[in-house]
Every structure is written in C-alpha cells, then in structure tokens.
Amino acid sequence: MKKNLLLTSFVFLTLFANAQKYKGLAMTPPMGWNSWNTFQTNISEDLVKQTADLMVAAGMKAAGYSYIVLDDGWMAMERDSITGDLVPDPKKFPHGMRAVVDYVHSKGLKFGLYNCAGTKTCAGYPGTRGYEYQDARLYASLGIDYLKFDWCSSDGLNAKESYTTMSNALKMAKRPIIFSLCEWGNNKPWAWAKEVGQLWRTTGDIANIFDGIKTFDTWHANGVMTIVDMQDSLRKYSGPDHWNDPDMLEVGNGMSVAEDRTHFSMWCMLAAPLMMGNDIRKMTNDTKAILTDKDVIAVDQDVAGVQAFKYTDKDSVQTWLKPLQNGDWAVCFLNRSSTPKSIQHDWKKNTVYDSLSAKEFNAVKNIYKLKDLWTKKESGTTDKIFQATVPPHDVVLLKLSK
Ligand code: GLA
C-alpha cells in the first residue's frame, strides 16, 4: 500500500515536473532577427552568415538583439528515410545545420529554428506531429537555443496538448531552448501557455501596413494598428518569462519612417518580443536608428516586465502608459490619423493607479522629469502642462522619471 502510494507520488511528481518549461530563459522579451517577413523560404547559409556578421558590425547585437531564427523553409521536403530525422535542405545549407549554428555561436549570438505542431509546416515542409521527442533531441544535438512552433496542418489536434508535448520534449532533451508558440491566438494560449513556453503569438500574421487588413488568396494579414487593438485586453497574461507576442517587426519593410517609429514604439510599450524582420544587409540609416535606439529598447526590456495599457482614446489620439521599474513611467501619445494633432496633457490632473502592477503615477505628490525618447530632448517636468504636436501616424514617446 505504502509502496503504491510512493509509486503514484513519484509518477505524479515526474509528470508534473515534465510539464514545466525551462525557467528563466526570457526574463525580458526576447530580441533577435527572423527570416520570414522578408525572405519567406528563400533562405541560405550565406544569408545567415551575412546577417550574423552585420548584427555584430551594425550594432544590433550591442543593442540587445541576440537570436537569429530561421523560419519556414530550412528543411528538405522529406525526413531522412532511415532515421526519420529532419534534414536541412542541402542546396540552401550545403554544410549542414551544425556549421550554421556554430558560425552564429562564434559571433556571440544565439540560433533558432522553426517547425510546426501539425503534420506539415505552413509552407508544406515536414511537420513535427508524431516526432516531438525525436525532433527535440535533434535540436539539442544541433545546439539550437530557440524554437518557433507553428500551427498549420493541425486539424483535430488540441493546441494545449500539442504544445505541452513539444515543451516536455524540449525539456527532456536537456538543452535550454526558448519555446515560441505560434498558434495565432486561436485557442487563447495566454490562458494556458505560461508554463509551456516563453512567448505566444496573440494574432494572425502581421503585414507591412500601418492599419487595416491585407488580403491574400487564402488568408489575410493584420496591419500594425489592427494588431495593437487586439493587445490591450491581454496585458494581464504577460510578464517576465511569459510574453504576449504580437508578431515580428515590419520595421524597414515598406512603411514610412513615422509609421516604423510608431510600430517600434508600440511594440516596446507592449513589452513585445523584438524580432527584426527586415533585410539588415540593406537597411537605411533611418531603419537602423529606429531598431537600435537604446532608450526605446530600454522601455521594452524594462525588468518590471509590465505591458502598457491604453489610458485615453480621443479624436484619433491614444495615450498609452507603461509602468517601469523604480516608479518611472513610459508614456506614448499615438496619432492614428493622417493629420497632425495637437495634444495637451495636465499630469497633475491625471493621477493613475495600475492595479495589475500596483504602480502609481502621481504628479501631485511627485515631480517627474520628462525625456522625449526619440528626439532625446529633456522636456521639463510634470509641474507644467505638456503640449506637443504629434505628426500623422507618429508618436511622441516620453519617459517620466522621479
Ligand atoms: C505562419 C506563421 C508565420 C510564418 C509562416 C511560415 O503563417 O504565423 O509567422 O512562420 O507560417 O510558413
């Protein structure tokens, strides 16, 4: 009897332990580069090497970007006929994947791959369904640090179970690998994925447009503002080591400089993972300046790990607030319209208490110094009413420090 009880407790504890992801891999939102938004399946060893070199040379690594993630299209169309292992496409990766991983690691960067919980990836390559433990062991043996796991060809599967199986498989493979769930928010991953992975997509794919929806043959993608609108209600689910992921960045992929600045500012306000999605070999100085702005990135990477909330929304101008460590706040005035907007904000009349983070903004009790994070201007204190003009599709992003 006693023996049975011991056995049952052992089995229970083992199962329970297995259901826990690796802890502490993403205490601030992960930052890196992913191949999909620009290259889709046109990827190669050369692209990875050039990107890795530039991430170091152009200051992206110094700014905090550490992962290079190959998305869909890195595999051959079939698994190895004898071992069942995934095989890298020999044309794209003539020296195999280990050589690519080693190169990226030699630059002091980390490396990630993509697969899918279903039987096929979204681009039709072999999926992981039925091969979870085998694939996890392969990834560990290749030395990868990050796995993005998609949700195509998943008919009849239970999302929570499928992603938990892969999370357990990664844990059993004994290598700390960030697990990025890409289930598009279909089954509310924010409600169950905290113990499964470090980040989860909250929406379908992003498009390189400021607002609205971009329609393709069989699917559609969301503009930046459309995604922003879906995030506010999810803030309570996000925090250190478990982030809402509103999808990868489109900065440098065709929007105006103001729109790119707004996109980047809002992703930082939302404590979103910052995965660059542009061709960094061809980026303009404006794109580089946006992506590497240390002050703005610091808003995203703030260790309090609190997602912003929408405080006001009037006449196409929204005010978003993000509590930061040490009682500081980030404030983003976002002009969604296509005309300039004048704003006036009386800090003293806008005391705020955020019950989620238990942080207070109180300009009656405290004086905060204002810094405009994009222009770098010190803009006085909260003793004065703040006035500014926000250009169309642009932001004024402030940090308020006590
Ligand atoms: C899905 C994902 C994208 C990308 C593609 C690859 O659409 O949401 O981010 O990974 O698949 O096929």
Image (cartoon, rainbow, N blue to C red):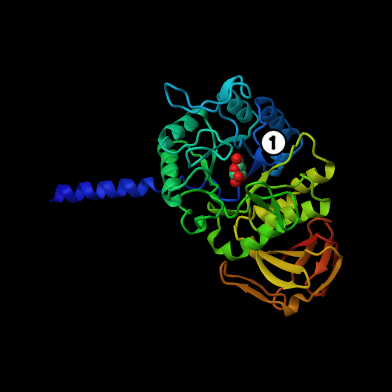
Q: Where is ligand 1, by quadrant?
A: top right
Image-based side of 80 in relation to 322, left or right: left
x and y percentages locating residue 402 in the rendered image? 71, 67
Kind of residue at badge 1: Phe
Write down the quadrant of residue 45 in the picture: top right
Which residue is rendered at x = 28% and y = 50% of the image? 12
Which residue is rendered at x = 78% and y = 57% of the image? 373
Which residue is rendered at x = 59% and y = 34% of the image? 111
x and y percentages locating residue 324 in the rendered image? 65, 61
Using the rendered image of the protein, determine whether residue 34 is visible from the camera's viewpoint: no
Seen in the picture, residue 271 relative to 233 is either above or below; the reply is: above
Q: Nearer the viewer, residue 4 or 24?
A: 4
Image-based side of 135 in relation to 227, left or right: left
The residue that label 1 is drawn on is: 39
Question: Is label 1's Cβ within 8 Å of ligand 1?
Answer: no
Seen in the picture, residue 381 relative to 76 is either above or below; the reply is: below
x and y percentages locating residue 116 in the rendered image? 51, 40
